Image (cartoon, rainbow, N blue to C red):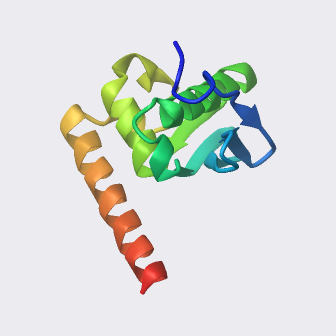
């Protein structure tokens, strides 16, 4: 499995960010925090030129790996993290309540709410 321009980049982890550095000097990142036995997935960003290559998925999977290693429940706050759990039903057992108990329909509604909130926030920052 290789991506354009030099293969699959390494997923790196700090105490607050999971990130992937690219050869062009840009970075994809997933901001998170660990608190009260939970890992909160706060914000995901992939530079436009690197989107659609599975980078965000790999970062969320790294967060899930951290959750498993540390016995944490996952709280998906950013739209991409919610989308990941919508598409990867087998990973939902790691979710904190109320997310774990949500139906597909409720999870989809939550995803759309998070996406709308992020778009509004981003529009406000640009204007």
Q: Residue at x 64, y 41 (%)?
A: 39
Extreme residue toward the top, this view: 1
Left or right, 97 with reference to 36: left
Query: Where does the image place residue 8, in percent across and percent down from the top left?
Result: 61, 23
**Residue nearest the viewer, comparing 13 with 65:** 13
Residue at (24%, 43%) from the top-left corner?
Answer: 108
Residue 112 against residue 84 in the figure, above or below: below
Q: Position of residue 70 (x, y in %)?
A: 74, 26
Q: Residue drawn 70% across and 27% down? A: 10
Q: What residue lies at 35% left-to-right and 73% top-to-bottom?
A: 120
Q: Is residue 42 visible?
A: yes
Q: For this rendering, which residue is in front, 39 or 84? A: 84
Residue 119 lies left or right of residue 28; in this view the side is left
40 in relation to 11, above or below: below
Residue 100 place in picture, x, y as percent? 40, 32
Rendering coords of residue 57 (x, y %):
49, 31
Q: Is residue 65 above or below residue 56?
A: above
Query: Which residue appears farthest toward the bottom when viewing the image?
Result: 127
Residue reaching furthest left? 105
The outermost residue toward the front is: 5
Q: Number of labelled discs?
A: 0
Can residue 98 be seen here? The reply is no
Position of the C terminus, as image quadrant, is bottom left
- Quarter of the image holding residue 53? top left
């Amino acid at each position: 499995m290789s991506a354009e321009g030099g293969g699959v980049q390494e997923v790196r982890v700090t105490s607050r960010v999971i990130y992937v550095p690219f050869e062009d000097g840009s970075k994809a990142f997933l901001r998170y925090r660990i608190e009260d036995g939970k890992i909160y997935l706060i914000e995901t960003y992939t530079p436009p030129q690197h989107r659609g290559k599975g980078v965000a998925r790999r970062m969320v999977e790294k967060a899930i790996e951290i959750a498993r290693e540390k016995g944490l429940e996952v709280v998906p706050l950013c739209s991409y993290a919610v989308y990941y759990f919508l598409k990867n039903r087998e990973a939902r057992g790691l979710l904190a309540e109320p997310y774990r108990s949500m139906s597909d329909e409720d999870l989809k509604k939550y995803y759309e709410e998070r996406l709308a909130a992020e778009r509004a926030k981003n529009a406000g920052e640009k204007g």
